[in-house]
Amino acid sequence: MTPVVAGRARLAAAILAGIIGLAGPVRAQEPRYYVEGRKQVRELAGSIPGAAGRVRIETDRGTVRIHPTTGDAVAYRIRLRAGGPDPAEVRRRLDRMAISASRSGDLIEFSGSLPARGSPRLEAEFEIAIPGSVREVEVATGAGDVEAVGAGGKVSVLTRGGRIVVRDIAGPLVAETRGGDVLAGTVGSTARLVSAGGNVSVDSATGDLTVQTSGGDVRIGRAGGDVRVETGGGNVRIDKAGRGVTIVSNGGSIEVGEAAGAISAASAGGGIRVGAAAGGIRCETAAGPIVLDGVEGAIRAVTSSGSIHALLEGKRLLGDSDLQAWQGDIVVTLPESFPVTIRAFVDSPVGQGIESDFPLRILRDLEDNGRPLLIGEGAIGGGGPVLKIRTLGGRIHILKAKNVKPEQP
């Protein structure tokens, strides 16, 4: 064989070896068996060199922990644990769960599969170290907790029975559990968090945020975009939203500290409190008080059983507004220069149904069904959008703000 032909043969062999390395099983260390307390352990560990764009972990059972590492290799450590009086039988159980690691192009996959029948009693734990260059991480486990920390790209997590903890995620996040809490730290993009029966909390998300839980509380620190929350029976608290907020709760209280956009909040059985809403607010509750500490924009607030307290700030209402309490008092506080037209109604008034620091024209009338109706009308600050206030069996108080300075035009 001539030197040229030999060189070409070596080049072809090298290319073939590279192609083979891009797909198929990855060589790992031999499994190691040892005793840990009262349990036997089967451990498989290894490292897959070469830059990878995606990492996927899919297992029928087991906890999954993902943490960052330097370099471009993906390191892994998989441990199976089982106990019992018969060491040989325990060893057979450990070997019945198939573990594999493979690579196809820039995708690295880890899998754990149990037999279809007679699933062995054992615990599984996947620990994966990923470099910051990985663009996407996918995790799916049939039963177990998931923890993901420091991922540089998109993270998707699904567990059918465990808690999810994620922190310091640079890209978008999707996390869903069918039986546990979801706890998220800092997310550098959008996030969608779902729990079938647990609490959900987020410290910070840069983009839009969607949260759904069938029966738990929701706590959100800060969100840079729109926020949408649905809970089947829990309380909701949001400290700050960079845009609009939409909340639906079938049985809990709602509290929003500050929103740069509009707020829509509805509860089937809890109070609602808003600290500040630049884009107006629409809120309804079947049973509970409503407190609006500082609202700019149009307002619609309705409670079937509770009081309403509203502090109006800013230059003016951005549209006609409506406050209704069917089993409670309504208190509205505003600066004397705030331009608004008041139309107040008290159905079936008892005593002095309307009290106002501003001059109002008070009328008494009868509704079509003969029920007495007390009406108060007047313009404040030269008049402006209409603020309709109505209560059944309660009282209306319109107060002059003592320490509120209106914004300068």
Image (cartoon, grey):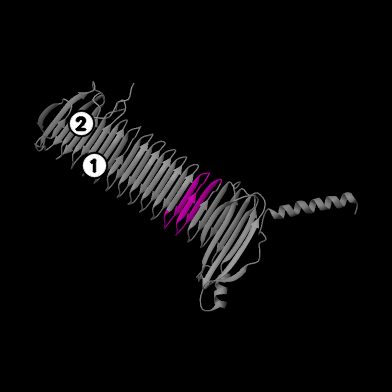
Q: Residues within 10 Å of mark 1 (few under 14, many from 20)?
A: many
Q: Nearer the viewer, residue 390 or 187?
A: 187
Which label lies toward us, 1 or 2? Answer: 2
Residue 384 % position (x, y): 26, 23
Residue 47 % position (x, y): 64, 57
Any magenta on residue 171?
Answer: yes
Q: Earlier in the sequence, mark 1 or mark 2?
A: 1
Picture quadrant of residue 327:
top left
Mark 2 — residue? 399
Mark 1 — residue? 303
The furthest residue to the bottom: 86
243 left or right, relative to 250: right
Q: Residue at x 46, y 45 (%)?
A: 191
Residue 404 % position (x, y): 28, 29
311 left or right, relative to 344: right
Q: Which residues are magenta?
A: 152-181
- The answer to whether residue 267 is visible is yes
The amino acid pointed to by label 1 is Thr
Check if mark 1's residue and mark 2's residue have beta carbons within 8 Å: no
Q: From the image, which quarter does the N terminus lie in?
A: bottom right
User: Secondary structure beneath disc 1?
Assistant: strand
